[in-house]
Image (spheres, rainbow, N blue to C red):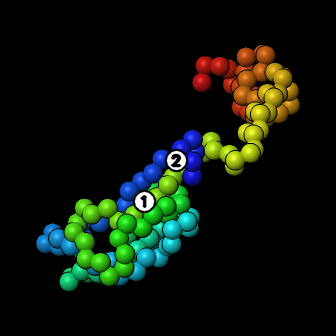
Amino acid sequence: MTTDQIAATTTVYMPVLGESIDEGTITRWLKSPGEHVAAEEPLLEVATDKVDTEIPAPAGGILEQILVEEDSVVAVGTALAIIAEPDGGSTQPGTEPSPPAAPDPPGSSNPAIAFTRTGACYPCARSFQH
């Protein structure tokens, strides 16, 4: 990733898993760096002396980096991984973004046109006042 293609990132932190739980052991990563992850999809497994649980991804994107290896004991609040969020407007190197489609002329039969020249809403034939 070059500097002109930097996407927003989200850091995954060790969550609070209980009132008296201060740390946990990373038992298994369910995704590898470079893999796509959906928001709320299980990302890793954590074990404590009271509970074993899966930690979901806080955002969707690409798992960019794992900061803590398996079998490591980490405190609540420790950064565990970085997810690169899709930037939505990026293109592959060497490609040009496609130009926007030309709008349909007013009064066309396309239902996507909300208002016609008569001042009525096309889908429901109500006036502009709604």
State whether residue 58 appears in this view.
no
* Image quadrant where residue 113 sits: top right
Residue on which disc 2 sits: 7
Q: Tell me the number on the disc at residue 82.
A: 1
SS for dot 1: strand
State the residue at coordinates (79%, 16%). 117
Proximity of marks 2 and 1: CB atoms separated by less than 8 Å: no
Q: Where is residue 83 in the image (x, y as percent from the top left)?
A: 46, 58
SS for dot 2: loop
Q: Earlier in the sequence, mark 2 or mark 1?
A: 2
Q: Is residue 41 above or below residue 122?
A: below
In depth, the one of 125 and 30 nearer the eye is 30
State the residue at coordinates (51%, 68%). 33
Q: Tell me the number on the disc at residue 100.
A: none
* Image quadrant where residue 14 sits: bottom left
Q: Which amino acid does label 1 sit on?
A: Ile
Q: Position of residue 30 (x, y in %)?
A: 47, 76
